[in-house]
C-alpha cells in the first residue's frame, strides 16, 4: 500500500510528463517511489500544448500537499523549467531520449536554467535517479524513510561488491 511522508494517502511527489510517450521512462520513477512506500500523483501536462493547465498545477502544488515534483520531457523540454518558475517546491528534471538529437536537446533544455530558478537535472532517461533524489529530499524530515534509504544504499554496495567475484569467476573460467 502506498504511504506518504505524513502517513496518510495524499501524494507527496508529483510526477509530470510532457506526453504519454514519456510514460515508459517515467513509470520507473513511480516504481522507485512505490519501493519506498511513497504516494505519487502522475499527470500528463505539456508546457507547450497545455500551458494553462501547467500554471494551475504548479501554482497549487504546495496547497495540494506535494513536497517534490519530478518532471520528464523530451525535445524542447521546457516542462521542468517552467514548472520550477511557478513553484518553490524542488523540481527534478528528467531529460527524455529523443531520436532527433539523441536526447541532448532534452538534456540541454532542462539543465541550462537561468540563475534563480534551479532544476535538479538527472541523466537522460534516468527517472530512477530522479525518484531516488526525491526520496533523499523527503528523508531529511522523515526518520523511517532515512533508514529505508540507508538500507537501500547498503544493498547497492553489497551488490556492487559481488561484481568483483563475478568478473573473477568469468576470467578464471576462461583460463
Ligand atoms: C515533449 O515532446 C514530450 O515530453 C515528449 O517527450 C515529446 C514528444 O511528444 P509526443 O509528440 O510523443 O506527444 O513535449
Image (spheres, rainbow, N blue to C red):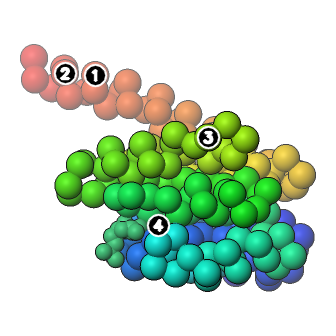
Mark 4 neighbour class, 10 Å CA radius: few under 14, some 14 to 19, many 20 or more: many
Q: Quarter-wise, where is residue 25 in the image?
A: bottom left
Q: Is residue 32 visible?
A: no
Tag 2 near tag 4, CB within 8 Å: no
**Position of 82 compared to 160: left or right?**
right
Secondary structure under tag 2 reads helix
Instruction: Of the two numbered discs 1 and 3 on the same chain, state the one appearing first in sequence.
Output: 3
Instruction: Of the two numbered discs 2 and 4 on the same chain, state the one appearing first in sequence.
Output: 4
Q: CA distance from mark 2 to mark 3?
A: 49 Å
Instruction: Of the two numbered discs 4 and 1 on the same chain, state the one appearing first in sequence.
Output: 4
Q: CA distance from mark 1 to mark 2?
A: 5 Å
Mark seen at residue 26: 4
Q: Residue at x 73, y 53 (%)?
A: 90
Instruction: Of the two numbered discs 3 and 4 on the same chain, state the one appearing first in sequence.
Output: 4
**Position of 26 compared to 85: left or right?**
left
Q: Residue at x 34, y 58 (%)?
A: 75
Secondary structure under tag 3 reads loop
Q: Residue at x 41, y 46 (%)?
A: 107
The residue under label 2 is 171
The residue under label 3 is 114
Amino acid at each position: 500500500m502506498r504511504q506518504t511522508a505524513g502517513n496518510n494517502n495524499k501524494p507527496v511527489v508529483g510526477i509530470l510528463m510532457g506526453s504519454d510517450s514519456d510514460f515508459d521512462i517515467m513509470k520507473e520513477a513511480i516504481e522507485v517511489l512505490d519501493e519506498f512506500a511513497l504516494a505519487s500523483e502522475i499527470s500528463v501536462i505539456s508546457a507547450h500544448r497545455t500551458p494553462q493547465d501547467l500554471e494551475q498545477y504548479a501554482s497549487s502544488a504546495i496547497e495540494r500537499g506535494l513536497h517534490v515534483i519530478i518532471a520528464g520531457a523530451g525535445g524542447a523540454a521546457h516542462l521542468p523549467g517552467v514548472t520550477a518558475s511557478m513553484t518553490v517546491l524542488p523540481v527534478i528534471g528528467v531529460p527524455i531520449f529523443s531520436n532527433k538529437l539523441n536526447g541532448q536537446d532534452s538534456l540541454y533544455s532542462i539543465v541550462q536554467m537561468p540563475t534563480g530558478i534551479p532544476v535538479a537535472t538527472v541523466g537522460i532517461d534516468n527517472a530512477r535517479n530522479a525518484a531516488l533524489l526525491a526520496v533523499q529530499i523527503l528523508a531529511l524530515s522523515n526518520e523511517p524513510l532515512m533508514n529505508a534509504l540507508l538500507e537501500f544504499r547498503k544493498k547497492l554496495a553489497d551488490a556492487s561488491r559481488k561484481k568483483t567475484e563475478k568478473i573473477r569467476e568469468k576470467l578464471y573460467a576462461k583460463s
